[in-house]
């Protein structure tokens, strides 16, 4: 790749067309530019209807751009002849684990993509086992998905994607339907995939604490990316964040309020420990 | 409450019958059914009974499970027996009252039919007790695969079956939730007139249908994301492999079938 970016989105516009009526089209994406480097872990934050899920669906060709270009791993996402190749490189995990598990046996569900791609049996067996071990669900390989908790089901869904050996995984609010325990399981699985296998992660979320765990955050509002920076920098823009209907982590808000009141504390504080340390320092002074 | 419904009738185990290739099991079951309907004498039926008993013992499934499978067809059995008893007028009359005549032949036929149906149910239950629904689907797909040449959508059918099986527990759970939600809003499902109760069911079915359509849409997208494009060029994780024991089982079944045919001829 010339650019060195694994995902290169330029001037992306997208409208849902109303049947037979071109004017009634609602424009959901209004010119999105986003480049993502290989191995990055980026969170896309945004209020409901900001276009973040729509953006995600462009990365593996579920939706195709009305205008603009999406290049993923050197493949033009609008090129239908390379659609399966694209989807193999860029896997996608959705919100509801129940609605993306196809088979009644865990290991067969993980194998689903490989079966579709016609991977021979021996290799399929190996890749399914590897994927299940990677998400820590190997002992459950012969269970039925209905016996699993939400977090476990979502890990199975992730394994089903990893088995394809993708270079990118796009996760569309993967923890939205899970309990806190399940959210922790899924987040640590995602981070491990990024760290150990170097898979580029695009995490669509509306949980601030999850976004804070990523190296980079893009904030979307009304079909545009309005902020794109490190979590510290993004969260310190408390006013902008509030204006687009997003919260910042409590500690950041506290630090921001304090600094606005004239105390010497950086509003780029996102972890509790940092904040405690800074406040203790203030007391000491 | 709804969760207690067992999905399929699979009874986990590791008997020789459990381990048979499901494709062979389906074929064997078909031969068995034909065998029951071939012989018209008690002797033929006795052979079928021996065969069934042998299979039941080998499957290691407790007898009471089979009793359970016969229970729902009891009314059907009684009706069959009564009809046969009343309609068979040939043979020695044992008892008569007005136009009702009970004959020796009538009793014979009734007993014969009952035994035949019970054997049929017990024998085919062995198939569903020892094979998971998903393997059954797989085996059916394999057995029907010659029809692909006639453009019959075998793979699609099997895929639909297995997705249906996969979603049964999910939808049951969902139904449970909807029932609770509607009850919380004051809906009554266990009281009132029959018509009222039927009308109240609509408040369960409508949300259930809407959510099913949404699920179907999401599932289709998720399947596309995993490169699903129909049955062409697909490989399978679950391999169906036939072993010598499958051929032996098939051979024994054919032997019994031949015996029934032979007995049927001799006894004439």
Image (cartoon, rainbow, N blue to C red):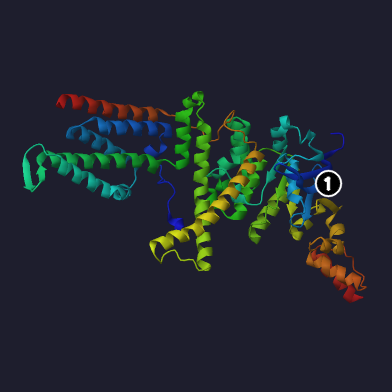
Compared with residue B100, is residue B31 higher up or lower down, i.e. above or below? above
- Please name the residue shown 52% across and 48% down the image: B167
- Please name the residue shown 59% across and 36% down the image: A125
Q: On the rendered structure, is B53 left or right of A161?
A: left
Quarter of the picture holding the N terminus of chain A: top right
- Find numbered disc 1 in the image and state the secondary structure of the residue it sits on: strand
**Along the line of sight, the residue nearer the viewer: A89 or B188:** B188
Q: On the rendered structure, is A173 left or right of B192?
A: right
Badge 1 is on which residue? A32
**Along the line of sight, the residue nearer the viewer: B189 or A130:** B189
**Along the line of sight, the residue nearer the viewer: A182 or B234:** B234
Residue B94: image x %, image y %? Answer: 6, 44
Compared with residue B30, is residue B117 higher up or lower down, i.e. above or below? below
Q: On the rendered structure, is B1 left or right of A66?
A: left
Query: Residue A109 occupies which quadrant of the picture?
Result: top right
Q: Is residue A195 visible?
A: no
Q: How many marks?
A: 1
- Please name the residue shown 40% across and 34% down the image: B20
Query: Residue A241 occupies which quadrant of the picture?
Result: bottom right
Residue A9: image x %, image y %? Answer: 82, 42
Quarter of the picture holding the C terminus of chain A: bottom right
- Mark 1 crowdedness (10 Å alpha carbons): few <14, some 14-19, many ≥20: many
Residue A54: image x %, image y %? Answer: 74, 47
Q: On the rendered structure, is A205 left or right of B258?
A: right
Residue B200: image x %, image y %? Answer: 47, 61
Q: Is residue B90 visible?
A: yes
Query: Label 1 lies in what chain?
Result: A
């Amino acid at each position: 790749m010339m650019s060195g970016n694994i995902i290169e989105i330029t001037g992306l516009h997208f409208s849902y067309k109303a049947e037979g009526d071109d004017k009634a089209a609602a424009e959901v994406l209004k010119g999105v530019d986003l480049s993502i480097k290989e191995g990055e872990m980026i969170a896309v934050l945004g209020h409901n209807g900001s276009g973040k899920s729509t953006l995600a669906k462009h990365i593996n060709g579920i939706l195709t751009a009305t205008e603009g270009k999406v290049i993923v791993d050197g493949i033009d996402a609008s090129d239908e002849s390379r659609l399966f190749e694209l989807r193999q490189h860029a896997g996608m995990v959705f919100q509801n684990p129940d609605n993306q598990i196809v088979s009644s046996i865990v290991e067969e569900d993980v194998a689903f993509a490989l079966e579709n791609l016609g991977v021979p049996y021996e290799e399929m067996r190996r890749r399914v086992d590897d994927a299940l071990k990677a998400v820590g669900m190997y002992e459950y390989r012969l269970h039925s998905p209905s016996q699993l908790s939400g977090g476990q089901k979502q890990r199975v869904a992730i394994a089903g994607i990893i088995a394809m050996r993708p270079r990118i995984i796009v996760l569309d609010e993967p923890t939205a339907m899970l309990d806190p325990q399940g959210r922790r399981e899924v987040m640590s699985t995602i981070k491990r995939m990024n760290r150990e296998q170097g898979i580029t992660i695009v995490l669509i979320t509306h949980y601030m604490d999850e976004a804070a765990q990523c190296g980079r955050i893009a904030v979307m509002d009304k079909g545009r990316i309005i902020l794109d920076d490190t979590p510290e920098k993004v969260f310190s823009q408390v006013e902008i964040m509030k204006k687009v209907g997003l919260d910042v982590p409590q500690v950041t808000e506290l630090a921001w309020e304090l600094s606005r009141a004239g105390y010497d504390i950086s509003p780029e504080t996102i972890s509790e420990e940092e904040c405690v340390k800074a406040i203790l320092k203030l007391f000491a002074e | 409450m709804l969760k207690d419904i067992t999905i399929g009738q699979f009874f986990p185990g590791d008997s020789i019958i459990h381990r048979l290739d499901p494709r062979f099991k389906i074929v064997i079951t078909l031969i068995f059914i034909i065998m029951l309907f071939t012989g018209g004498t008690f002797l033929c039926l006795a052979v079928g009974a021996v065969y069934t008993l042998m299979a039941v013992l080998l499957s290691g499934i407790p007898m009471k499970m089979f009793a359970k499978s016969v229970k729902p067809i009891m009314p059907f059995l009684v009706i069959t027996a009564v009809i046969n008893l009343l309609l068979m007028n040939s043979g020695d009359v044992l008892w008569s009252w007005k136009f009702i005549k009970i004959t020796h032949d009538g009793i014979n036929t009734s007993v014969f039919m009952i035994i035949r149906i019970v054997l049929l149910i017990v024998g085919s239950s062995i198939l569903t007790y020892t094979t998971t629904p998903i393997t059954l689907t797989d085996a059916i797909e394999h057995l029907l695969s010659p029809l692909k040449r006639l453009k019959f959508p075998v793979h699609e059918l099997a895929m639909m079956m297995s997705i249906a099986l996969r979603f049964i527990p999910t939808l049951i759970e969902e139904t449970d939730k909807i029932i609770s939600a509607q009850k919380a809003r004051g809906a009554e499902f266990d009281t009132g007139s029959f018509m009222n109760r039927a009308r109240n069911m609509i408040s369960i079915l409508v949300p259930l249908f809407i959510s099913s359509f949404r699920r179907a849409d999401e599932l289709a997208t998720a399947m596309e994301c995993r490169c699903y494009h129909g049955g062409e060029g697909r490989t399978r994780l679950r391999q169906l492999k036939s072993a010598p024991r499958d051929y032996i089982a098939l051979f024994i079944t054919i032997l019994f079938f031949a015996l029934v045919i032979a007995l049927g001829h001799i006894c004439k």
